[in-house]
Image (cartoon, helix red, strand yellow):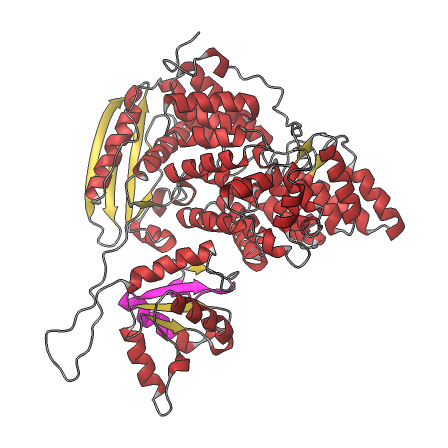
Amino acid sequence: MADIFLSYNREDQATARLYVEAFKREKLSVWWDTTLKVGEAYDVVTEVALRDAKAVVVLWSARSVLSRWVRAEATVAERAKTLVPVMIEPCQRPIMFELTHTAELGHWKGAANDEAWIAFLADVRRFCGVVRVAPESGEGLAQLIAPSAPRRETLLAVLAFDNLSNDPDLSYFSDGVSEEILYTVARAKGLRVIGKASSFQFRGPDKTPQEIVQALGATHMLDGSVRRSGDSIRISAELVDTATLQTLWSERYDRALTDIFALQDEIAGAIAAALDHHFAPARVPLPIDPTAYDLYLQARAVHAQDYTWADQAKCIELLEGAIGRAPNFAEAWGRLAIYRRGEHGIAEAQHGLALNPDCATSLAGLAMSLPPFAKHAEKLALAERAYLLAPDDHLVGGVYTILLLSLGLLGRACVVSAERATRDPLSPLVAGSLAIVYRSAGRRAEAIALADRAIASFPDAQYVKFIRGLIAIFDGDIEHAAAVAATMSTTEGDSALRVLVTFTNAVASMNPASQAASVDRFLRRNAPTAYVTDAGLAAAMGAGDVAFDYLLETIRDRHPVGFTLDKDGRAAGNDAAITSGLFLPNCEVLRRDVRFAEVCVRLGLYQCWQETKRWPDCVSEVAPYYDLKAECAKLASVVDLYDAQPASSPYDARPSPSAARYRIAGRPGKKV
């Protein structure tokens, strides 16, 4: 009996062989149809191998989804609870398997250290570790039978609690309380919780177990209501098994709003106990000023579908109000740091960590506030710890993803982004993030499909439109980018996408003699500041030397460097992650130029790669042209590090009204 039965289409045999060889290297035995012996009946032998296998790995491709054999084998495996599917290229899976978690390995070429492969292999090993027993009754030849179906892995959907307050405008409050309960429950060990952007789409008559199972695959749902009257709050909650429709737990709480954190922990503990999971409160809950909590929830509600400068300004204003009334509110300090960044952001994040060393938003805020061209390893460590503490917080996950991109760690960024999409499959922000990460990693078809699906589902989500337009520009499809840009709203003149479309069209219409001069003028239109995205775009259009001269001149002369000139905030690139622009698809021409090594050394990237022993994916990408590691090593002791300030944002001049007025050390929150 083999550990693994491999199901695939014959046209994908070369790819299938990669999997067979990789599994064998891991000491896992594999049955696939090349092992058939002469004279054996194909259907009989195949069926025996299929039913005996501990894990059935199905390779989904545009060809295998049309194969009756592969579909049948996947169906048998799904019923036997042995199915481990994997996408080897973008395709539309058979509808009955759309809700089955499927690994995405379309980019994988057999590398043993690929993080997506490692995660998939771990899943396969779990299946192959199941012990099988012989049947007690002896009927003919002894046969091994499949084990009893394993216990369902718990997947909880926390729905948006109904607003029963007299004021319908307080829906943000009931949503905010529900979201806080979601994040608190998610701390339970081993408990998977669907992200807010997905589960909160179900309201009113759509909040049925059948709808939740069909759309999200949840095994349990938590629903309830919130009624607020002044500084008093009543929360009713009910936990339901979506398969049996049995109510596992329900309770009603009447409390003062000042006890909201303690109440969230109490509800989360009760839910975890009902689901047989361990829950440990992250801290001793502190009383909270009701108005401060209200302002905090309003800030969370603002940043839901988009990320414009106006959104960020509103969040800053609300969070400033919250910490002004509740200076011990660590989570508010952390979120304020994420939006503010820079020196003020550092002070605010450190204050949050003084209040609560395990505050994920404060860790993420500090990571985003540290200097953009230094302390890369420290920023990465902070973001990783924050993500470990709060993987369900989309803002924390976004910080970790952008910092991975800023170091060129695209493989890990793909894994993290896919994890976020699994937790929150209906979030346009998460979908947009995953799409740009996939496109940067060379997974073009998957990226386009993701962005197009998100736009179809959320036609008003501006961020994912920006990402789709950006991908079109990377692909040279300016007509599509222009069409997307025309559907976007902006509050401050032309959006970054429209600027890029206009420039690209203008240059494309010029004769070659005029292009170089025009590109140079475009790059220097904001001198002495240089923008990484502009340089990449110019290089992609054939002006690589002009682009490199411009970028290196700026860095060597210590003039400001930014991600892109952004008038609406969606492409800000965040100060700490300006270097993410170097690893976008439009900078491919720059990366293949040996001068790219100097950029990496001067901007501190090489030092981080050496320190962490984590090298960017582009090392293999540029290998046919030069050895990036060797070239960086030659320059490390020769060139100076870049230590200038990044390009300014609309909020760099705004003072921080809070951090300087409270102690960072000593008793938190006490004014000085």
Closest to the observer: 33 or 417?
33
Occupied quadrant, residue 325: top left
Q: Quadrant of the C terminus?
A: top left
Residue 158 left/right relative to 105: left
Q: How many marks?
A: 0
Residue placed farthest to the left in the image? 137
Residue 187 percent across, percent down from the top left: 31, 38
Residue 330 percent across, percent down from the top left: 40, 23
Give the residue at x 74% y 39%: 552
Give the residue at x 28% y 22%: 259
Residue 85 percent across, percent down from the top left: 39, 64
Occupied quadrant, residue 214: bottom left
Q: Is residue 403 above or below residue 145?
A: above
Residue 49 seen in the figure? yes
Residue 294 seen in the figure? no
Residue placed farthest to the right in the image? 513
The span shown in magenta is: 72-97
